[in-house]
Image: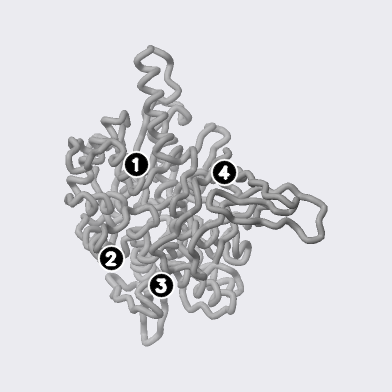
Amino acid sequence: MASRFSGALQLTDLDDFITPSQECIKPVKIEKVKSKTGAKIKIGEDGYFDLSGGKEQKLQKVEITLADCLACSGCITSAESVLVTKQSQEELLRVLSERKYTDSKGVKRDVNLVVMSISPQPILSLAARYKLNVQEATNKLTGYFKKLGVDLVLDMRIAEDFAILEAQQEFLERYHNQQNDPAGKYLPMLASSCPGWVCYAEKTHGSFILPYISSTKSPQQIQGSLVKQFLAAKRELLPSSVYHVTLMPCYDKKLEASREDFYSEILSCQDVDCVITAIELEQMLSNEEKSLADLECANLDWPWEASDESGVWGHAGSGSGGYSDGVFMHAAEQLFGVTNPSMEYKNLRNPDFRVVSLDKDGKEVLKFAIANGFRNIQNLVQKLKRGKSPYHYVEVMACPSGCLNGGAQVRPPQGESTRDLVTHLNSLYRSLPQSEASENSLVSRLYTEWLSGRHSDKARALLHTQYHALEKSDVALNMKW
């Protein structure tokens, strides 16, 4: 699927790059010529020009696929202004419009069910933007999507609980494997829910770093399996006839949804067909000259069972999903018999690198960290390469302050700092009812009825993934530093 990047990527208000960047140079296609000196390129206001032939010749912008993206330091952190043709609000509106047209003409539908899954972080971002409480923002978003033609609007609590439970179990397995094979690459286990970090690891550090990354899918992709395989079967629909959209805090989620690993040849579809973000939702409303605050409300759907437990939930710990806290508390109890351990994080280099540890009998037995932003990620990788990483688990997120400050969250209004906005979003996240993954009875039932058991091959196939060390493409996104 070929897609064009739109314009130059303007990277603003960012301080977490490996080196400071100002603007991403648009990729251009240069035909190879026999020359000892190579091509001479001039960068003009309206494009790029080849001067090698003695006169200016405007160069054509290159067309690249998602697989060609190098996840350079700019795109990987917040992917400012990256719009991918099949991953945009325009594509969502096109699908909904075509569906309404076929209905009005009595034509057989290609899409029988449109499902929207919404993540907590963009809801909080939009609630802050339109000065709504979280419940109001959720209900108005649901009403907006249903008016557009979406059939079901779902929260992501089940997928998030699955992700935490699988990460907990994977950590225990890795811990025991490390005890039996100290030379193996089992620990530290590095979180895998951030696609920007995963993409960077695959294309920059390759086979060295990948064994450490958790194989557990992100909540977005677990939700994709739930919708395309469990829900579709329950509705007696072909998975390919279900159009699944997610609302996310990060443009990199578009890249994740488009990975070949999440395309099923048997089902002929992706787990997630389209990703839109908080900032794109703001643009959609702005284009219609609407405010979220003025829209009609509707309730979230709960198609999983008879009872209705829909709503926006959070987890203990960080606003990125609470992976560090969830895995730490489970490991403390299962490995060392410590229930309700102290979760007092200490800042190291900066507030985006925090550590927490568990002591027993005067010895440090667990050490976890949260590393947000690429300065801290680079430091973490360098420690690993020097064999000096003291951590058992690290919650890694590409954006400073994590997912609440994702690159596609609504930016702060003039006069408000990013720090102040993130503080407010953190307070909103902590006000959400907290989900205890181990106490989610529906998840327990789905393990049995859908996945054939907690440790089955089906559970492994649908809740885990794999990574690939990738060579940089011949088509490069070069950065001007």
| Numbered disc in front, either 2 or 3 | 2
Q: How far apart are marks 3 and 4 (CA)?
A: 31 Å
Q: In this view, does 430 lie above or below 361?
A: above
| Circle 1: element type | strand
The mark nearer the N terminus, 1 or 4, is 1
The mark nearer the N terminus, 2 or 3, is 3
Q: Distance between the residues labelled 2 and 3?
A: 26 Å
> In this view of the protein, which residue sits in the foreground, 272 or 11?
11
- Name the amino acid, label 2: Ser
Quarter-wise, where is residue 471 in the image? bottom right
- Name the amino acid, label 3: Ala
Quarter-wise, where is residue 143 in the image? top left
Number of other residues with Cα within 10 Å of mark 4, as a class: few under 14, some 14 to 19, many 20 or more: few
Q: Distance between the residues labelled 4 and 2?
A: 38 Å
> In this view of the protein, which residue sits in the foreground, 85 or 152?
85
- Name the amino acid, label 4: Glu
Q: Is residue 113 above or below residue 276?
A: above
- Name the amino acid, label 1: Ser
The type of colouring in the image is one colour
- Image disc number at residue 117: 1
Q: Does residue 459 appear anywhere in the picture?
A: no
- Image disc number at residue 260: 4
- Image disc number at residue 472: none
Number of other residues with Cα within 10 Å of mark 2, as a class: few under 14, some 14 to 19, many 20 or more: few
Query: Badge 3 is on which residue?
Result: 369
Q: Does residue 409 appear anywhere in the picture?
A: yes
